């Protein structure tokens, strides 16, 4: 069964609550579909664990220096 909510932490002090099965990655996939732009054409930059799915979906991605702390 799909979760009712997706909860992630950002920057150690923020909590992000999204509808189950959604993430910044699924948002990027939807944007790609609606705009008819392949995911390979997107560039994503993130700094926390709540960005991981988006970074994985984009054709190119980068994590900022503080991202190393988020992965710990």
Image (cartoon, rainbow, N blue to C red):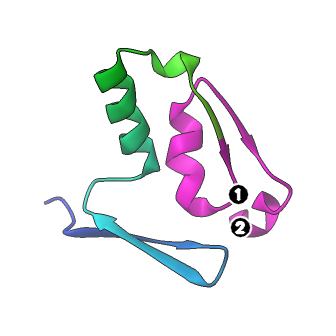
The numbered dot on residue 70 is 2
Identified at 80% across, 61% down, the residue is 68
Q: Is residue 28 magenta?
A: no
The residue singled out by tag 1 in the image is 47
Residue 69: image x %, image y %? 79, 68
Q: Does residue 69 sit above or below 46 in this rendering?
A: below
Image quadrant assignment for residue 12: bottom right
Task: Determine whether, in the image, residue 38 is placed left or right of residue 21.
Answer: right
Q: Which residues are magenta?
A: 45-72
Task: Determine whether, in the image, residue 25 is placed left or right of residue 2.
Answer: right
Task: Determine whether, in the image, residue 9 is placed left or right of residue 29.
Answer: right
Label 1 secondary element? loop
Number of numbered discs visible in the structure rendering: 2
Identified at 80% across, 52% down, the residue is 64
Q: Is residue 58 magenta?
A: yes
Say which label, 2 or 1, has the lower sequence index. 1
Residue 61: image x %, image y %? 68, 34
Disc 1: CA contacts within 10 A as few (<14), some (14-19) or many (>=20): many
Mark 2 vs 1: CB contact within 8 A = yes
Image quadrant assignment for residue 60: top right
The numbered dot on residue 67 is none
Question: Which quadrant does the C terminus fall into?
Answer: bottom right
């Amino acid at each position: 069964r799909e979760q009712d909510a997706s909860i992630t932490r950002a920057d150690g002090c923020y909590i992000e609550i999204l509808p189950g099965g959604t993430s910044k990655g699924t948002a990027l996939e939807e944007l790609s579909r609606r705009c008819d732009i392949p995911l390979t054409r997107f560039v994503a930059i993130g700094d926390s664990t709540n960005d991981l799915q988006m970074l994985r979906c984009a054709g190119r991605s980068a994590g900022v220096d503080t991202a190393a702390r988020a992965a710990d």
